Image (cartoon, coloured by chain):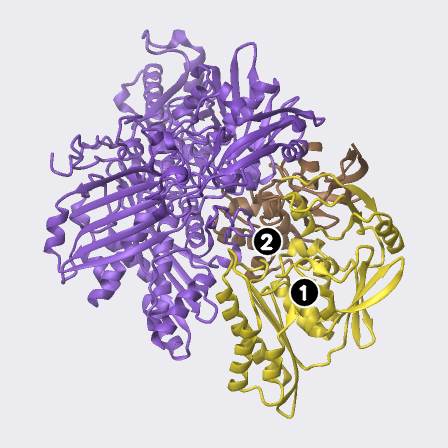
Chain colours: A purple, B brown, C yellow
Amino acid sequence: MTERGHIPESRQREKPRADLQWIGKSMKRVEDPRLLVGKGIYADDINEPEMAHAAVLRSPHAHARIVSIDVSKAQELPGVLCAMTGADAAKVCDPLPTWASPPVLQAVIADDRVRHVGEAVAAVAAVDRYIAEDACDLIEVEYEPLPPVVDPEEALTSTGDAVLHPERGDTNIGLERKLTFGPVEEDFAAADLVIERRIRWPRSGGQPLETVGAVASFDDGAGRFTIQCNTSMYNYCGWMIASTLRVAPHKLNIVPTLAGGSFGSKMFVHKVPVLAAVLARAVGRPVKFMEDRIDNTTSCDNHASDRVYYAKLALKRDGTLLSLKTRIIDDYGAYLQFGVGQHGNALSQCVGPYRINSVEVDLAAVLTNKCQQGAYRGFGSEVANFVIERLVDAAADELGIDRIALRRQNFIQPDQFPYLIPTGNMYDSGNYQAVLDETLKLADLEGWRAKQAEARKEGRYIGIGVATCQERSVFSATEFWMWNLEPGVEWTSSPDGVSVKIDPTGKAFVTLHSPFWGNSPETVAAQVLAEQLTIDPADIEITYSDTDQGLNSTGPGGSRFTVMVTGAIVGAAGKIREKLLRIAAHLMEADVRDLTLQDGAVHVKGVLDMKMSIAELADKAHYYRLSMPEDLDLTSGLDATYVYDHPVTTLPDPDERHMGIFYPIMGHSCHIPVVEVDVETGQVHFLHYAAVHDCGTMVNPMTLEGHIRGGTVNGIGTALFEEFSYDEAGQLTTALWTDYLIPTIKESPADIVVGHVETPSPFTEYGVKGGGEGGRMGGPPAIAAAIEDALKPLGVTIDSLPLPPSKLRALIRDAQARAA
Amino acid sequence: MERETISVTVNGRAYERAVEPRRLLSDFLREDLRLTGTHVGCEHGVCGSCTVMMDGVTARSCLTFAVMADGAEIETIEGLGSVEAMHPVQQAFWEKHGLQCGFCTPGMLMTAVELLKANPDPSVDDIRDAISGNLCRCTGYQTIVESIQYAAKLMREDGP
Amino acid sequence: MKPARFRYLRAASVNDALQALAENPDAQILAGGQSLIAMMNLRLVKPACLIDINRISNIGYIDEDGDGVAIGALARHNDVKHSPLIRERCPLLTEAYESIAHHTVRNRGTLGGNLCHADPSSETPAVMVATGATLMLQSLRGQREVGAEDFFLGTYETARRQDEMLTEIRLPGRRTDGWAFAEISNRHGDFAIAVIATTLRIEDGRCEAARVVASGVGEHAARLEPAEEALIGGPIDDARLDAAAAAAAGAVDPHSDSHADAAYRRDAIAALTRRTVRRAAARCD
């Protein structure tokens, strides 16, 4: 045990190999046919007999007491089945689940007080959504406005009426504490130079095309809820919803639907399923509640990180990075669903790919009159990436060292892995030089530098940005609670399970215990099982369990899925393979050690034609018990379940010298965009974009590239356009998609050139790493650097996002005024 | 409640239904006819998920009242092709990974079909223009462009 | 996000529509519906009665009208965008359509509906003012012509009276040689942050006539006369471009919103003025 903790032995069973048949192939997706013909069933596609539809009346105020509320006119409207207030809801359900400790209480419908624009004030169930909305218009609410808290730094000193949750004390600070890892003060004392920046990361969100929805019903006879919902983590912690609904956990079945995109935003949705369930029980009919876009933008579970950083990077004159200190004020909005898990997450890679000896993080999570935070592609680490990359660029400029050279100088070297960073997290493997070199090649850096110089002569501003970013994958549950002041939920498991069976005819069935939310779960499962059993993926059928049938499975999120389900399939397939070999050995009167599984059959090594196909063996396994050896464990059939635990984690140090290993499967990326900035209008155009990712062994390069490109365009949105913007009164001015600006194809580069480096993980099966979030984690710092490079002649510094034309033009205008 | 009786042909099949004038074509298709392949993303005309074909050209079904479609020929994703017999555009999106979550896909496909009908050999810029009103949050669009180019090729090869 | 109830009337003819307008003072015309229905879905507007004019035949025309063009009330944006007649006689409008909405919206949306909607950041009103278009308004009381400059009165506000229907848009023949349209929006196809539509006539190297029309920076599209004055009377050289750009920026009093602040809109107007005038002048050569 060192100051930074210890590294457990690897439990890897399947080594990375060159001779894989299915893993590594760009196989067409298993999921696609039904989606392409309009037969995928998403939440809103569910239709139950007698199903009612819900709509929600939302607060027009950022902060107010509810003085009175009258639903009588709504109740009387023909077609209305139920109009429910917060007080009504509080009679039948408890506060929503939270990971924060001490908790921040959140009701499914606000009772005495509203804390953000869009918070639910009443809900209606009616025979159709139109009437439900008509009824909402008839509800009369009297509010007594309270002071809105909008600015996160002002929230640090709120008292009195401006406090959102007075029961937690006379403050809007949800959690504040400082964590120190390593000799920070000594390192700063030894520094020749300290780079200081105030960096502002904007509130954005995943905003998938599909909102959150649920269809709930309550079976009076069984005393049991069924909720069909496009959520995730239901087989991990779905029972928490039962607690909110005041039924025993086995009196709730959560059934997953396809999710039309998530990007983290559907990780563990709570308001929508609880609301649908409460209404369903009240009206005695199934109830659908499908958020409309305004429900979603104003009151979803998933606005993302909204942070102010005061960051300091200490370094030597020769460019050696020493230490990183950050004071962070994070605007969490009105509630803390995942506690400050986003900051647990950010500790996993806050030093980037660099050797930095010590870290101090001083966090204030403030509560303001805005929608709560949740998860969005990066879950807080994308912000840490932006901060470290901006600081390294600033340091290089200050020292007069080339930005790329300074990175190379400080990279963790290939022979230093596995590597523990000061916070205690481990980087399992990597080759950052190789990724950088490959990106430079694809980006044609020298060519663009020449074009840049030419353009400058013509008064055009072209810039090239380089960001070298970490891309952590496979979170452990410790990230959700490591910052908590008081013990609360302190889980250490974050597994994923699968069930596999081979039917009597040799066809394979896989049950996944976590949902499809836009990724490729069926394709991954099919490729890995095909690899394991040497069968054709076309002979594999994939289904999803509900919580009644489910195994402990954390689900997608944190770029977990591919690594975890690969591990689970390897575990389950191993059991099936062992049984196949035993049966084959018995039937062919051979020694198990002489058998091998290939091309869908068990062969006796070296004996031509001595083989039995999986189909033949499956038939025997199912129907010919009396031909089998006498062994109580050798039951009829061919099936196995396997719950794969996180491949490598450790506990946080009790003295908090480190936080343990919690996010160790470490990918890496380098992004090099080339942009042109129109200095008169502040508009940014992409001239080229190269991105190289190292996600270990690739299971499916085609789908991985899809994630990289899609994530990069998410990153472009964050960097240039997207912001949930609240005005001084706490009104969300970008609630509509005419104002919350998701990039169209016209704002996206025509060609994002993607390259790969494969440095396998020594800890996961086949060496696979996750790659779901890297695009959004690498894009923003690279784009900021490119814009800054373009505007170097004007001396513009980028430390705040997003940069739509108006904001960028303001920076240019200021710089021009300074120069004049 | 005032209702209007409308007759529409959807994917070649005739329907007659009484609808409230305010009923959106998207809800009419999805709820009254149970054709849920057409998706609703924003309901205020920005995302293009709900795009259907109306009398041969695309329309945003969330910005169309069902009564406005009285007498019209509507085509939706369900009429395009089946898993056994995919339309070349569907085939191409599958081959070229033109979708991830699949939610924008029906609208994207209908828009692509309209483009390819008018322009059998579109340039990248033509394709980018044509689908600029359809948001996709998953793919970054690049493989969608490749899919449509590939579909154009398939359709030219299969053509008369 | 569903519209409130309304009465629905379907007009079979223009007269039918005018009759319905006269009889239903709470009625609004439903043309393409691409702006109206979005606002109704959001319940930002709740018209009590809609008169659907989409079934009226023969009012989607785009015809020669002397040396100009007459456009019927139901001409869809895409028909106008792709019309060779418009391209020949009013290329400024064709160019503007490069920035207007997206293909599917243009399939249904109508030029007439767009003008009557009078969104302050809409592109087409700027083109109408720049070209000196005339709008024909009809009611049971008769017909009147209103010049585009007098038609747009404020945000979502026009000279059209409640019982009137815009039946035709008349674009004059080209009276100037140079024209250019430019727009800035955060995303392609969005409503504009700033628009400039410019028309110029240059004779013997001297600018004889100019219209510089802005949209997106006030309550409605309007000529920026100080900019026009700065251009007229001499060659379009750098000094005149700078003077016109500065005059244009000074002539607007824009608002701030989530898309851009006022200072940006002023900068954008200056940049767009310079660019459109330069391009328009080049087209005069």
Quarter of the rendering containing residue A376: top left
Q: Which residue matches tag 1? A: C124
The image's mark for residue B133 is 2
Q: Nearer the viewer, mark 1 or mark 2?
A: 1
Question: In what quadrant of the picture does the C terminus of chain A appear?
Answer: bottom left
Q: Amino acid at mark 2?
A: Gly
**Horizontally, is C82 left or right of A640 in the view?**
right
Mark 2, Cα crowd under 10 Å, few <14 / some 14-19 / many 20+, is many
Q: How many marks?
A: 2
What distance separates the C-alpha of mark 1 from that of mark 2?
19 Å
- Any part of residue A598 in sight: no
The answer for which chain carries disc 2 is B
Q: Nearer the viewer, residue A472 or A810?
A: A810
Most extreme residue toward the bottom is C204
**Kind of element beneath mark 2:** loop
Q: Nearer the viewer, residue B117 or C265?
A: C265
Q: Nearer the viewer, residue A232 or A749?
A: A232
Mark 1, Cα crowd under 10 Å, few <14 / some 14-19 / many 20+, is many
Question: In what quadrant of the picture does the N terminus of chain A appear?
Answer: top left
**Kind of element beneath mark 1:** helix
Quarter of the rendering containing residue A624: top left
